[in-house]
Image (cartoon, rainbow, N blue to C red):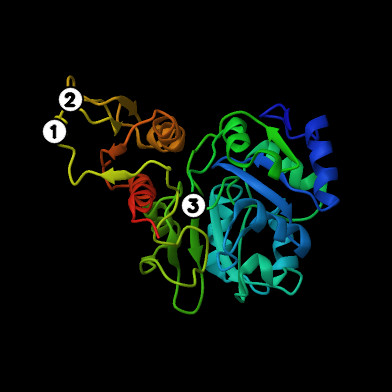
Amino acid sequence: MILKTQAASTEPTPAVTRAAAILRAGGLVAFPTETVYGLGAVATDARAVARIFEAKERPHFDPLIVHLGSADWLDRYVASVPPEARRLMERFWPGPLTLVLPKCEDIPDIVTSGLPTVAVRMPAHPVAHALITAVGLPLAAPSANRFGQLSPTTAQAVEEELGSRVDLIVDGGPTQLGIESTIVALGETGPRLLRPGPITMEELCECLGREVMVANGPVATPESPGMLLRHYAPRTPLRVLDSRAITPLPPGRRVGLLAFRSAPPSHGFSAVETLSATGDLREAAANLFAALRRLDAAGVEEIIAEPVPETGLGNAIMDRLRKAAAPRA
C-alpha cells in the first residue's frame, strides 16, 4: 500500500503516523530519503531487521545502514566517535554521509553482519526525519529494492520491486539526489572512502584537511553496503563504453543508450535516456537510476552507457555504472 505525504513536511502527517505505528510493531516501511527510498525496520529489533533481508533477498553478510533522528542519538548506539567523525558530522549531517564506527551492544549483530562496527547516518529528507523522530528509535534501512537491482527513487519503483513484501510505502515524491550516500570508515588507519556518493572525495579532504584513502576493490566480507563487485544493476545486460565515442549499431539489434549529455543522431538505438543535457553531474546523478529503470523496461537486448567525467560526483556515477556492468555471479 502506498500513502502519499507532503514531501517538505517535518511534522508527523497521517501517513507518517501510520508508518511509525507499523515500525514500532515490527513491520517494514519504505520511505523517501534525500538519496533513494529506504526499506526500514527498527534497528534494535532483530526479528524486524531479519524481515528486511528476507524481503530484499539480501545475503546476511552485507551489513545495513542505521538511520538516526538526531546527532545526539549517536552516543546511544556507537561505542566511540573519533574527532574526525565529529568534524564530518558538523559539516555534512544531516545529509548523505554515512560513517562506519564501533558499535554498541544495543545494535543487533544481524544489522552489522557480525562486524564490530556499524554504519550510521542522519538523513536530511523531512519525511525521513519526521518518521524516525515519530518512532523514537533508529531505523535500519537499505535501499527498498531486490538485492543487487536498481535502487528506487520513487514510491512507484518501490512497489514494482517489492510489492506486498513491504507493509507500507510512504510516498514523498521523487528523491532529490538519486544515488546512495557516501560511506566513510574512521579508524586507527585514518579515514577511508568505502563507497563514493553525493559527498565527494574533494569535499571530504577539504573538511578533514588531509588525504582520504580509497578502500580496495570488492571484498568477500564488506564493511558497508555497496562494496560488492556487482550491484545497482538492471536486469538487462549493461556495458559501459571506454570513451564517449558512440559508433553506429549494426542493423537488427535492439540496444538502449544511456547518454550523458545528448545522443548522436541516426545511430540506431531503440531507446535513449539522457542524464543531463547541460552536463550537470548532480542532475545526472539524480536521473541515473530512473533512466536505467526506463531502459530496463524498454525491451532492449543490451544497455550501453556513455561514461561521465570522473570528477566530483562523476566518481560516484561511474562507480554505480561499473558495478551494474560487472559480470553476473
Q: Are marks 2 and 1 in contact (CB under 8 Å)?
A: yes
Residue located 71% across and 35% down the image: 170
Q: Amino acid at mark 1?
A: Thr
Residue 191 visible to an observer of this rendering: yes
Instruction: Give the secondary structure at mark 1.
Output: loop
Instruction: Give the secondary structure at mark 3.
Output: loop
89 displayed left or right of 307:
right
Q: Quadrant of residue 161?
A: top right
Q: Count neighbours of disc 3 (C-alpha within 10 A) and say few if under 14, some if 14 to 19, many if 20 or more.
A: many
320 vs 45: above or below: above
Q: Determine the CA span between mark 3 and mark 1.
A: 30 Å
Give residue 76's position: percent from left, percent from top: 75, 66
Disc 2: which residue: 267
Residue located 69% across and 49% down the image: 40
Q: Count neighbours of disc 1 (C-alpha within 10 A) and say few if under 14, some if 14 to 19, many if 20 or more.
A: few
Instruction: Give the secondary structure at mark 2.
Output: loop
Disc 1: which residue: 247
Q: Determine the CA span between mark 2 and mark 1.
A: 7 Å
Give residue 175's position: percent from left, percent from top: 55, 34
Give residue 129's position: percent from left, percent from top: 71, 43
Q: Sequence-wise, which precedes: disc 3 or disc 1?
A: 3
Q: How many marks?
A: 3
Q: Count neighbours of disc 2 (C-alpha within 10 A) and say few if under 14, some if 14 to 19, many if 20 or more.
A: some
Q: Amino acid at mark 2?
A: His
Q: Amino acid at mark 3?
A: Gly
> Which label sits on residue 148?
3
Q: Sequence-wise, which precedes: disc 2 or disc 1?
A: 1
Residue located 51% across and 75% down the image: 187
